[in-house]
Structures are given as structure tokens and as C-alpha cells.
Amino acid sequence: MHHPGPPRFVAAGDSVELAPRDPDPEATYTWQVKSAPASSRASLGTDAVEHFVPDEPGRYAVELDAPDGIHELTIRAFPGDLRPVDAPAEGASGVSGRSGFSGASGVSGVSGMAGASGSGSGARGGDSGGGGGRPRIQLRARVEGDAVVVEADPRPNPNSDADPADLGVEFLLDDRDDVSEGDVEIGDRTVRIPLSKLSDRVRVHAVAIDDSYSVPDSISIERDPNSGDLVSDGGVEAGTVEDGGVGGDGIADGGVDLDSAASNPSEGVEVVRLNDPPEWSKSVTLYEIYVRGFAADDEEAETTFEALEKRLDYLADLGVDCLWLTPVLQNDHAPHGYNITDFFSVAADLGTREDYESFVEAAHDRGMKVLFDLVLNHSAREHPFFRDAYGNPDSEYYDWYEWQENGEPGTYFDWEYIANFNFDNLEVRRHLLDAVDAWFELVDGFRCDMAWAVPQPFWRELRDRVKERDRDFLLLDETIPYIADFHDGMFDVHFDTTLYFTLRQVGSGHEPAEAILDAIEQRTEVGFPDHASFMLYQENHDETRYVGECGEPAAFASAGALFTLPGVPMLYGGQELGQLGRRDPLAWEHANEELRDHYESLIETRNEVPALRFAGDFRRVDYESDSDEAVAFARIDGDEGYVVALHFGEGAATVSVDPDVGETDVVSGESVVESGALRVDDVAVVPIR
């Protein structure tokens, strides 16, 4: 199906990339504006990939004439002064910075006219917003009689004084589904969908509106012919009404069984929250393997993949259950592997495709997931297509690449060995989608390199493409600094670049430890929804080693932060050993066994304490310490809560906390209370009484 995807929420003046999905480069695709606000003069050209700029607030409908029919797409353009600060244009690439940059992207706080204009439900009334930044929204579903009700839960920005009841909500139905607005009832906070109108599925998208509009949330109501249960959260039966409006018995809020309510009793209905991360990803410990260094000392293995496979038992004993391998495809001379010369072949110096498949199977046998490092922004300049195109405008591959006026390829940061793809070319999109298909079946997720440098609609297409076949497939984006809009139908988990930088600043003594709390709270302040997930890291293959820059005491504390703050902890190969070289072969013979044991204890603690994982709330607590290198916070899961204290300095810090806590640190199993206060060497996790 060539339909261009879900409806778009943008600000007037923003560019919207329009591209046919699953394109046939030999086919003809044409676009036209079907409807627009009366004062609009926006138009479309004749290319297959267009960049449409709505020039007035309101609702637009554009049509794609494709080989499989006419497809309509709705675009909702808000007034320009509702545009979230630093929200990137969705067709743009190169919107981010390089690794380690400290600035935040997507920081909200737009002032000016707050009212929404144009058609659609839920336009917010009133003359002024609550100030303070971008709101958030989450959609849930329940059954009332003979209908499914989708309900929006809008929340103001943490820095806003707005009342949630005063926030606007705007809903859009998905143009791809066989349900129109005339078939449903759209209210200020709800969409009521009669079961009699649900033939296949209905996808509902919504934003909250205050001084700017939120990152959209999306939910899908689907017929499930194989089950009579109403399920939610990506196909997992919901256990409570709060988790999606249904009970663990599959009976929805109000006691209505969907089987009896539906027009066809043999079919059930499924509720899928489209932007929630896979359930398995919420509790894993991720480990990055630099493929040409991690097992380079193995002189007996015939291939690199065999050597890596022999190290899997070590990783399993450590407690690792998800692996990210740096690129394994054919590449140029650079050992990091990110300069790809063939998107369909495994690098010959690592082994064969069969060797790679054997490694993945061995990891799966040990209960480990495997992430494939997906590089889509560019190819190596040694790629045969680029070599044919360079300096040759008559080449069939010339339009595959971006070109500067001086004849050199487009790239970032003056990188001299890569060339950026031209995503306006359907052959490029087809080639890369075929590569996605080639590797999708083997692995459990993609770590998406330079995600900021690829147009957002392409990521949305990729997500739909893989999630249609496997809802539990994981998408992790490298976007530095992170961007809240990348949780709009693109990625499940995001590099927490702000926490990374803060851990470096705290560890090197440039910031007090309390800055860590600000880093966590910044997620919602810049507009990330509550269901977004983050990868926590202190180093990777692009960064210097934390222990080398910040010292051993800080390294022990930073490890504690990774496993007690909300998110998915990631270790870079050798981090647990005290490795000093960034990409050197691991110095196994010089391993810091105390640090390794520390990581093993932290992994065990997080596995055993649900409050430290995804579902656990993060809260500030009142505390006092004799050192600004110490900080305390709480993690709460239902009736169970823990106070976590971290200390990044030499020796031990004394930390007094409120609330009252127990004496035993669940990480070490030892008492850490002296004279009514916590004595913290690096990390302590104590239960709240």
C-alpha cells in the first residue's frame, strides 16, 4: 500500500515531507491539494516526494494518485505561535548535533497567541495558556455498551500553572482506515467508536494544546479474529483499568464483554497503544559490543562471530540480556563499520551471514535479545554506487546522493569517508527498505544510527513496516541531543543524551550531583510523553571512557545511577572491567574485578526490585548531605518504595533523608545507617518504611 501514512500535526509554515510508502521507483506518483483553509495558497509540485508547506492554520487534505489508487492524507496546521520551540521540520535532516553536545532539543516555552484555529474537535478556548512549556498526552480505551471509547489524558508541562481541565485536545482519525468522522462521536476528551463500524481497525491520533501542542499519541482499535479478549499495551492482556481500560479477564471497564457487544460474537477487539515500547525492553540490561575489539584476543576462533559467541556465557553470567553490536555489514577501511559499502552483505572480515545467524541464535538460546546497528543516512564513498556517481552527473546513481555546489557530496561535520543519501529519490528509499527487510527477520530490534539525519516520515514508515509483522520489535534512536517528537510513531527508546552529559559533568566535579535530578525531569519539560523510554549510558564507542575522565569513585557512583534511575541501562563493552581504551581490544587481564562485581550486584538488584524498572515512579525527596557530590531520590512502585543515594566523591558521604528508611542496602546487603543517616560510599538503595 502506497498510502503516505498517519495524519500530521504541524505548525503553519513548517515543511511536511510527502512520500509514497513501499515505493515502486518505476511507477508514477502525483500529488494534489484536495482541500485547504480558504485563505491558503499552498500548492504541490510534480515530484514523487514533495515538501508541502501549509501556509495558514487549519486542516488540509492532500491526495496521492498511486498505482494502487487514490490515497488521502490529513494535515492539521496550528498557528505558528503554537509551534514547539526547536521542534524539527519532519522532512528535514541534519537537525541535531554531534555526540556529547550538552544543549537540549525541543525545550518548550512558546509565548504568544495560545488559541487553536482551524477545523477539528477540541480547539482550546480562552485567551491564554498556562505557560511553562509543551504539554503531554496519553490515550486509553474502554468499552461502554456497544462502543469503544478512546479517552485522552492531557497533562500540562511540569513548569506550567495550567489546569489539566483547561487544556485543549484535538483528535484525528487515520485516513488509512475505513471509518470516517461521520461514523464516530468526537468530544472534548473522547472519541466514541460504535463496534458496528469497526470492520478492521480504527487508529486514533491526538495532541494536547496549551501554549504549544504536544507530541501526538496514537491508539489502534482492531478486530482480532483469533481471540475474544480485549487486550492492550501492544497485545499483552491488561491487568488493571488504569493500564488501558480493561481487566485481566479481558472484560472492559463497565463489565461489558466485547464478544457479546460486537456485531460478530466470534471476533474480539484488541486495543494497541502504538507508541509504547515493547514490554520486554522495560526490564533489560543492554550491552554494546564493539565487534572488532570485544573478542579480538581470541586467536583460536575461526571468525569474529565465533569469538563473540564464545563470550556469550560471560555476558549471561554478568546478567546482560540484550546485545547491541556495532555494524556488521560490508564496509570500507574504518574498523567501526559505519561506512557501509554493501547493505545486504556481512563484512567478510567478521565471517559469513551464516556465522552471524549462528551468533544470534546462540544469544537467543541464552535468553538474550540482539539489536542490529542500522545505518541509513549515508553510504561509504567506497560504495560502488557512489564511486559510479562521483563526478559523473550522467550516472544512474547520481541522484541517489546529496551534492554540494562544489561537486562534493553532502555530509556532516566534514566527515570525509561518507556521503549522504538523497531521500527524495524513490530508488534510495526502495533500496533501504529492502535492506530493512533483509535484516529484520534475524534480530529483535534496530539501533538506528544518526536518526536525526533521516527524514521523520521515513522512520514512521519503517516503524509501521516492522511493527505490522512484530509488535515487540524494538527501535532505538541515536539522536543527540534527544528530540521529543521522535516519540511520535518513530522510536521506542531514546538515547538519554542529557543524562549522559550530566553524569560527565557531575563525575568531573563541574556540577553538583543534584543536577542528575534535573536531567531526569528535563524529559517531560521538553515534551516527552510519560510512556517514552530512555537508554541510560555513561560511555559508548564514540566517547572516552568514563573511569578515565572522571575517576574510579565517580565510576562506581555513575554505575549506580544507570541502574536506579528510570530507563534502560546500557554498558559499553569493557565498562564493567574498568577498560580505558575506547575502541581497543579489551584488557581482560587487567580487569577491575571489584567494579565488575559492583555491576553484577546492580544488575541483580534492578532485576529483583520492580520499583527500579520502567513502572517505578521517580520522585524527589528531602535530603541533606555533607557533600554536594551526593544526591538522593525515590523510586516508587505501588505500595513499595526505595530511597536511592549516590555519592560521586572520594570516601563516604553522610546523607540524611526524609522519609524514614530501613537500614539495609539492597545492593550490598549491609547496614548503611549510622546515627540516623545513610553512609554512602557510591550507591545505596534502602526501602522506605
Image (cartoon, rainbow, N blue to C red):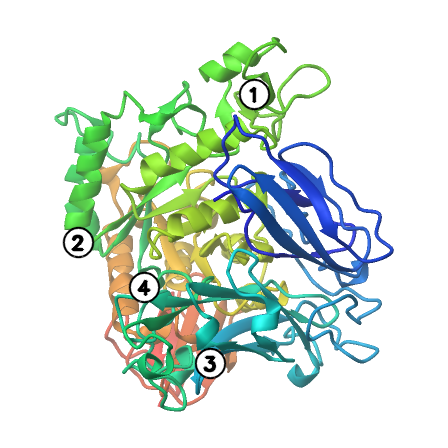
Q: Secondary structure at mark 2?
A: helix
- Identify the mark at residue 293; answer none if there is no mark: none
Vertical order, 581 against 457 (above or below): above
Location of mark 2 (residue): 317
Residue, far right: 39
The structure residue drawn at horizontal position 67% and vertical position 67%, both measured from the top left corner, is 134
Amino acid type of the residue that numbered disc 2 sits on in the rendered structure: Asp
Q: Which mark is residue 147?
A: 3
Secondary-structure class at tag 3: strand
Q: CA distance from mark 3 to mark 1?
A: 58 Å
Q: CA distance from mark 4 to mark 1?
A: 39 Å
Tell me the residue at 60%/56% (across/down).
Answer: 7
* Marks 4 and 1 in Cβ contact (< 8 Å): no
The residues tagged by marks 2 and 1 sit, at their Cα atoms, a distance apart of 41 Å
Residue 610 or residue 530, whichever sits in front: 530
User: Does the residue at mark 3 contact the one at mark 1 (Cβ under 8 Å)?
Assistant: no
**Which type of secondary structure does the marked residue at label 4 adopt?**
loop
Residue at 23% of width from left, 51% of height from top? Answer: 368
Of callouts 2 and 3, which one flags the residue occurring earlier in the amino acid sequence? 3
Q: Which residue is mark 1?
A: 416
Amino acid on which the number 3 mark rests in the picture: Ala
The numbered disc on residue 283 is 4
Task: Give the mark nearest the N terminus, 2 or 1.
Answer: 2
